[in-house]
Amino acid sequence: MSSLPELPFPLTAHGPAAEWNYSAGTLSVTAAPGQDRFVRPGAPPDPATARDAPRLLGVPTGDFRLAAKVTVDLSAPGDAGGLYVHGTDDHWAKLCLERSPLRPTVVSVVTRTVSDDANAFETPDSSYWLRVSRTGGAFAFHASPDGQRWTFVRLFSLDTPKGAADVRVGFMPQSPSGTGCRVRYAHLSFRPGAPGGLRDGS
């Protein structure tokens, strides 16, 4: 898959092979068992045991807002689908709707050689809106029950060689402990410009 009609930039698959499908405005993909992207804090990265997950990414220009209603088959702890930001192989971030550990939860991870791990809040079910924005040299994660009023999750930078200019963004599923996880991205939208305010619901 090289493009989506809602996005103004081409997309390239990264990581393990996966079947990305687009139909009737919905992007879908399934993570295989054991797929994840996470570098555990407190333990040195070990390439021999590192895991990866499929990603579909492109390079937007300028400030932007990329959003989607994400629906995840949350069968096992850690099953998730989300939006992904890639600076380098050891500087990246993800915003996910994840089973953590028993309930659907908005979870974010920012990795600078090692990952952090932050649960934001639980959601009523396994569908929720997620959004990543670029605002100058930083990125913002937001989540929403309706795609209209957004709750701030976090603001971060990735400290990549070219700052935020050459960062890739897109989509990623995972199933670190389960037998696989199907994810659907509906109501995809890409808008130029950063949010009007990071904490005012816009």
Image: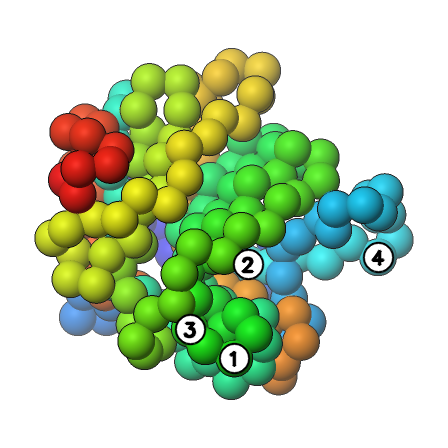
The foreground one among 197 and 66 is 197
Image coordinates for residue 72, horizontal then vertical, percent: 39, 74
Query: In the rendering, which numbered label is found on residue 54?
Result: 2
| Outermost residue, top side | 162
Specify whether 199 is left or right of 126.
left
Q: How far separated are the C-alphas under marks 4 and 3?
A: 27 Å
Residue hosting label 3: 104
Front-lying residue, 186 or 15: 186
Element carrying mark 3: strand
Query: What amino acid type is highlighted by mark number 3?
Result: Pro
- Say which mark, if any, is on residue 138: none
Q: Secondary structure at mark 1?
A: loop
Question: Mark 4 — residue?
Answer: 49
Q: Measured from the top left, where is residue 104 in percent x and y? A: 42, 73
Circle 4 residues within 10 Å: few <14, some 14–19, many ≥20 = few
Q: Are marks 2 and 3 in contact (CB under 8 Å)?
A: no
Give the foreground label among 1 and 2.
1
Q: Could you tell me if residue 173 is visible in this image?
A: yes
- What is the CA distance from the residue labelled 3 to the residue labelled 1? 7 Å
Mark 4 secondary-structure assignment: loop
Q: Earlier in the sequence, mark 4 or mark 2?
A: 4
